[in-house]
Amino acid sequence: LVLLLRQGGLEASFEDSSEVLKTGVPALLYLVQNNMQYLAASYLDAPTLAVASQLKVLTTAIFSVTMLGKSLRRAQWIALSLLGAGVAVVSVSQMDVAEQSKSRGESAAVWPGILAIVVACTLSGLASVYFEKTLKTSQVSMWGRNLQLALFSVAIGAAGLLTGNDWNHVEEHGFFGGYTTVVWMTISVNALGGLLVAKAIKEADSIVKNFSTSIALVLTAVLSSIMFDTPIGPLFGLGVGMVVYAVLLYGGMVNARFCDPLQRAPAVCSWAR
């Protein structure tokens, strides 16, 4: 908001009502996605949820190809699959054993959770790519788009607050009741992270954003181990290795070699580009 006021772009961000309404689409998609994730968490155990959530890496790539016309090489598709698998391995390795063994009931009750997480991952990919398209195909600045998205999010959040069970707490303690220094720091970090994500999407794309998010998850686990003595095992090392290799493979810094096991000729091996 401050940058828009300084640059004189605040009014331009709301001149075209159709452009403003376009930003409401990803805001609504993110809302439904979050609800689907909460629903999935009520049916699935933590490891299953962590693994299934990585489907968003592939859905983002699929929507990038279909909606934006991107072209991905075979090695890049492999790198995306490897990235999702690596992040899932890292996530599972950091979970408590007791949490991993926790049962959610009969296996038949798992299917609503699986369906919910598939919907959530699909909406995540769609929202990310749609937002990328709005950033790159209109005259509205990145800061203007972020302001529009924030206003839609505030409106949706306010509606949920007024119709939910938390309004009584707000009336009693005020909207900022219970906010501590740590809470304010967390809000600030998340706000800065949101701006950086938008910048990454505009300057690169949604797929690269997923890579940066995955690397951040690995770094978070490493810092957690250093600061809070969280144990790190071989499974974590395997996941980190998969993530690092996926990043290098996607960027073309390494090649993946494939051999046809049905052939015996020396030339049946090829390098994926």
Image (cartoon, rainbow, N blue to C red):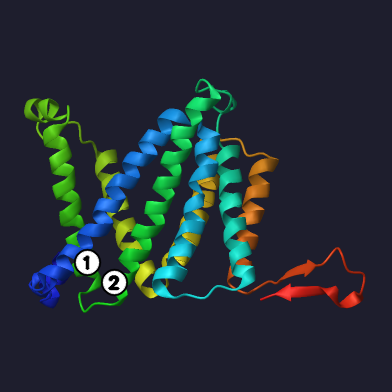
Q: Position of residue 203 (x, y in %)?
A: 38, 74
Location of residue 43 by image quarter: top left
| Residue 216 in view, yes or no | no
Q: Residue at x 50, y 30 (%)?
A: 110
Which residue in the structure is indicated by mark 2? 135
Whether tag 1 and tag 2 are in contact, CB under 8 A, the answer is yes
Q: What SS does tag 2 mark? A: helix
Q: Taking 33 as reference, is 214 left or right? A: right
Q: Taking 190 as reference, is 17 left or right? A: left
Q: CA distance from mark 1 to mark 2?
A: 7 Å
Location of residue 118 by image quarter: top left
118 or 94, which lies in front? 118
Mark nearer the N terminus (1 vs 2): 2
Which residue in the structure is indicated by mark 1? 145
Q: Residue at x 37, y 64 (%)?
A: 129
Above or below residue 88? Residue 149 is below
- Disc 1 residue type (three-letter): Arg
Above or below residue 255? Residue 111 is above
| Residue 248 in view, yes or no | yes
- Disc 2 residue type (three-letter): Leu
Q: Position of residue 28 (x, y in %)?
A: 25, 52
Q: Residue at x 44, y 75 (%)?
A: 69
5 or 225, which lies in front? 5
Q: Taking 5 as reference, is 109 left or right? A: right
